Image (cartoon, rainbow, N blue to C red):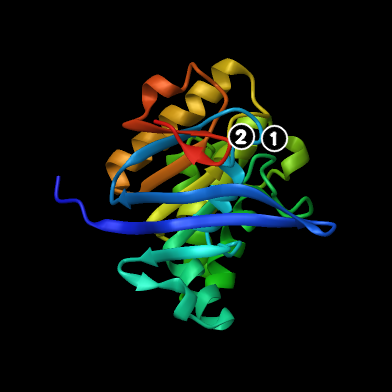
Amino acid sequence: MNQKKIIELENVSKSYSVGESLVPALSNINWSIYSEEFIAIVGPSGSGKSSLLNLISLIDHQTTGKILYESKDVASLSEDDLSIFRSEKIGIIFQNFNLIPVLSAIENVSFALQVQGKIKDQKEIEKRSALLLRELGLSNFLNHRPNQLSGGQKQRVAIARAIITNPEIIIADEPTSALDSKTALEIIQLMKRLNEEKKITFVFSTHDTNIINEVDYKLELKDGNIIG
């Protein structure tokens, strides 16, 4: 496997202001993520998992240290450039799906391509979205709205929405926490298949010990520090 370094964190710390106090969430994190990896971030509540994911998904900014994407210091990017960079490089899967309730499955996935703006032809957008949803086992649910789908089906739509833009990396915060154990394992196995077939890097947080066996390796956090 010819892996390249996608993300590098150098002495990254993150603190939040609470009243007049600064509360540390992450302390001097040094970590690199390579192409095609399938990584679980584990640790108890409050260990810094969500804070770390928010930083590497460029949703939030570090307090100190550097975050490099393909050797580019993201601090040098303007907010507009950062937004473009995110739309081209990063896909995000949310814990509670975050699908648009009034849109069908195919419309939710198509919306991601419309926002990215690279493809202008609406028929081509719909064609690609339908093809991907069928690939993920949703052939009979293209026109169903989120309230007509099971939890596992919603997460498959959310995964399709995340990968339709052809990102290098998918970041997911507790993507299986709203699912039963059987469906959760199916979703992780689906993510692993996409990781292998489409060569997309996956980084996700989880509390589910049954899922850990599916990953290439795990990053363990405690009190904002890497411990394993």
State whether residue 121 appears in this view: no
Q: Which residue is pictured at 60% across the width and 27% down the height?
A: 44
User: Percent from the top left, x then y, of residue 210?
Assistant: 48, 16
117 is higher (above) or lower (below) than 184: below
Other residues around mark 1 within 10 Å, as few (<14) / some (14–19) / many (≥20): some
78 is higher (above) or lower (below) than 122: below
7 is higher (above) or lower (below) than 73: above
User: Percent from the top left, x then y, of residue 102?
Assistant: 79, 54
> Which dot marks residue 153?
2
Other residues around mark 2 within 10 Å, as few (<14) / some (14–19) / many (≥20): many
Q: Which residue is pictured at 39% across the width and 59% down the height?
A: 10
Kindly identify the amino acid type of the residue bearing the numbered disc 2.
Gln
Taking the view exactly as shown, the residue that stands out farthest to the right is: 19
Q: Which residue is pictured at 31% across the width and 48% down the height?
A: 198
Q: Secondary structure at mark 1?
A: loop
Q: Quadrant of the N terminus?
A: top left
> Circle 1 sits on which residue?
149
Q: Are marks 2 and 1 in contact (CB under 8 Å)?
A: yes
Q: Nearer the viewer, residue 173 or 17?
A: 17
Q: Secondary structure at mark 2?
A: helix
Q: Nearer the viewer, residue 119 or 180?
A: 180
Q: Quadrant of the C terminus?
A: top left
User: Percent from the top left, x then y, of residue 143?
Assistant: 66, 47
